[in-house]
Amino acid sequence: MTTMRDVARVAGVSAKTVSRVFNDDPHVTVETRERVRWAMQKLNYVPNLLARSFRAGADAAVGLAVPDIADPFFAEMTGSIEVDLVGRGMAVVISSLFHGGRGGEAAERERSALEALLRRQISGLIVACVSADQSYLAPWQERTPMVFVDRAPKGLSGVYVIEDDLGGAREAVTHLVAHGHRRVAFLGVSTPVATTRRRLAGYRSALAENGLDHSPDLICMPGESADEAAAELVKRLTAPDAPTAVFSSNIPCTMALVQALQRAQRTDVAVVGFGDFPMAAALAPSVTVVDQDPARLGHIAVERLLQRLEDPSTEPRRRTVLPVRLIPRGSGELRPRP
């Protein structure tokens, strides 16, 4: 049976290049692409993920597990992953890890949900973890390629694609400081997820670089609910030394904060949120955000996974950090009252 390596030998290229041609990589030159396709035709080679999956005893499907499919960030990332994989003839089995549970419940849900996917003998797994330990995946990792997105695995060595959380948070807080704010609060939820810790570190770094206070009373992480966190922060805004600006560490917190500020009729508090979301630009004031590009995150996660599926001997880049960018809008440009 003709293999990808046979095609590579006849075409005079590497197996990785053959894979890139099959995946329609735009960086492959026209001459190389034509040579590889000529070799495929000469050898009657038909790339078939479905056939390879059956030979390996696995379904032609990829498991995808995210914290909450209703979250705009994960919804867009999921859509991008699904389009890429379905376009390559593979099905996607999606699981939401929270399902109303947080904390310890979410950790238990993560393990049971992922092991349920893996027992189906899927071809590969893409996952955004919610628990503080993924060491239980080690036995499964030996036979199922995995890619972790948005946060690196803990207790396990693996391929992961994340965003520059620390740099994005630092840029967001620096933006608020540049507009005159000296008391900047941090809004988030209590969670073991590394993204929150990295964004908190970026927040503290920006304040320290500007010689500003980053005392514990400015950090609002009262529980595991975004609504609870936003309500608590709005209460703190009535204190004599209240913050004049807020850096919100995720989309659910930003949306909850905007609603809480509207209910309290507070239009004098500057806000920058990590992650863009629908209607952010249409609100009054429109919400300044750090844009993560979840679609690109999904594309690269699929690319890393397909590298392993196409040629298990290849080792994809273990760590990929994608840049983020600040989108200035009205809510971040509010200046503190004299």
Image (cartoon, helix red, strand yellow):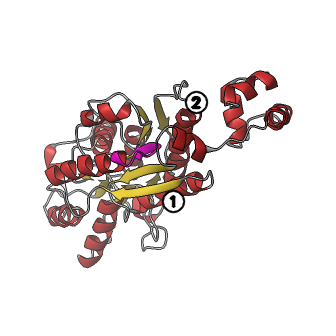
Residue 191 appears left or right of 301: left
Question: Tag 2's secondary structure?
Answer: loop
How far from the left and from the top, in percent, is residue 82? Answer: 52, 56
Seen at 74% across and 37% down, the residue is 45
Residue 122, magenta (yes or no): yes
Q: Which residue is rendered at x = 42% and y = 51% of the image?
A: 64
In the image, residue 265 lies at what x, y percent? 27, 77
Q: CA distance from mark 1 to mark 2?
A: 25 Å
Residue assigned mark 1: 79
Q: Is residue 60 left or right of residue 243?
A: right
Is 258 contained in the magenta span?
no
Residue type (three-letter) at the residue carrying disc 2: Asp
Quarter containing the N terminus: top right
User: Residue 153: percent from the left, percent from the top?
Assistant: 32, 35
**Mark 2 Cα-neighbour bin, 10 Å: few <14, some 14–19, many ≥20:** some
Question: What residue appears at the point 36 percent right and 36 percent down from the top-left corner?
Answer: 152
Tell me: residue 117, above or below residue 41: below
Compared with 11, 241 (above or below) is below
Residue 23 locus on image (x, y percent) = 67, 42
Span colored in magenta: 119-126
Q: Amino acid at mark 1?
A: Gly
The tag earlier along the polypeptide, 1 or 2, is 1
Q: Are marks 1 and 2 in contact (CB under 8 Å)?
A: no
Specify few, some or many for label 1: CA neighbours under 10 Å numbering under 14, 14-19, or 20 or more: some
Quadrant in which the C terminus is drawn: bottom left
Mark 2 sits on what residue?
A: 311
